[in-house]
Image (spheres, rainbow, N blue to C red):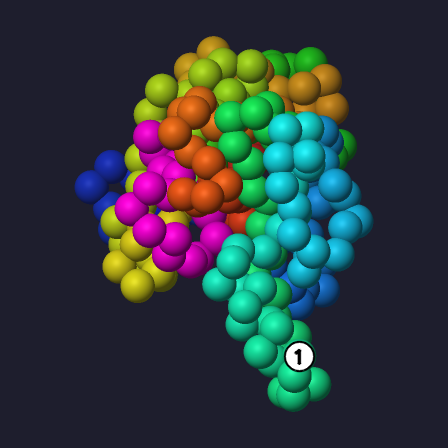
Amino acid sequence: GIPGEPNHEGTHNWTMGNVQCRTSFEKILNGGIEEIVVGGTSGDGLDLMLPKGHLYYNKGWVMDLGEAEKKAKLKLERYGGLGYQDIKKSYYGIKASGALRLLLPHGSIKREVKHTDDALYWYNSLVVCEVNERRGGGECSLERDVQFVVGGIVATNVRYIDEEGVSYLGKKICVTVDIPLNAKVAPSGSLPVEISVLSSKVTLKTGACSISHVVWEELEHT
């Protein structure tokens, strides 16, 4: 779950490649998650405060706010917002939403992909985080209820990270997704990722799955 790798065996010095992050939270200057989303969404551009039901969720993942966040925003609006500009919005999805399709760019734009399209040659790690909110015992688990297809291959090793800084009120919110052995990059050099909800037990009422942050480490070759 920790980016980087040892410089030499037995040493305490680590080398870390370029790490990129995209987030759905506001307020941000750059690096919005919309930059890497290439398909599988529904209701784009809708007011975040409006209720959104199966009409939208059955067509794709929806950029939305959790119920607790909406209630908090409504209270603040009575007092002009009190200067708060942060918004914990996220892409929410259920099984009927299908796959949320991402394309993670590699920073070395000028490199020749034809050297190899092996994803593990260019990408070292992938971490995906859900929105930091508690919604009860029946809410989605990224580890149990979600399938990640990375570079065209289903990721079989997905596990929550048990570390400080990636939890909320004791709830783990980030998973590390191992890049599969035979995963391939796209001709552009970007890494295709598809995220789908597999469990029909995940509902809007119990707590839909959410994707808020995507972090990946690139590997450089000279």
Rendered position, 213 above or below 116: below
Q: Main secondary structure of the magenta part?
A: loop
Q: Dividing the image into 4 quarters, which one contains the N terminus?
A: top left
Image coordinates of residue 179 in percent, x first then y, are 44, 25
* The residue stretch that appears in magenta: 128-145
Q: Is residue 141 magenta?
A: yes
Residue closer to the observer: 10 or 85: 85
The image quarter containing residue 73 is: bottom right
Q: Nearer the viewer, residue 111 or 177?
A: 177
Image coordinates for residue 206, horizontal then vertical, percent? 41, 43
- Of 82 and 34, the residue lying toward us: 82
Tell me the residue that label 1 is attached to: 77
Q: Position of residue 72 (x, y in %)?
A: 54, 72
Instruction: Inspect this view and state whether residue 7 appears.
Output: no
Q: Nearer the viewer, residue 146 or 164?
A: 146
At 41% from the left and 25% from the top, the residue drawn is 199
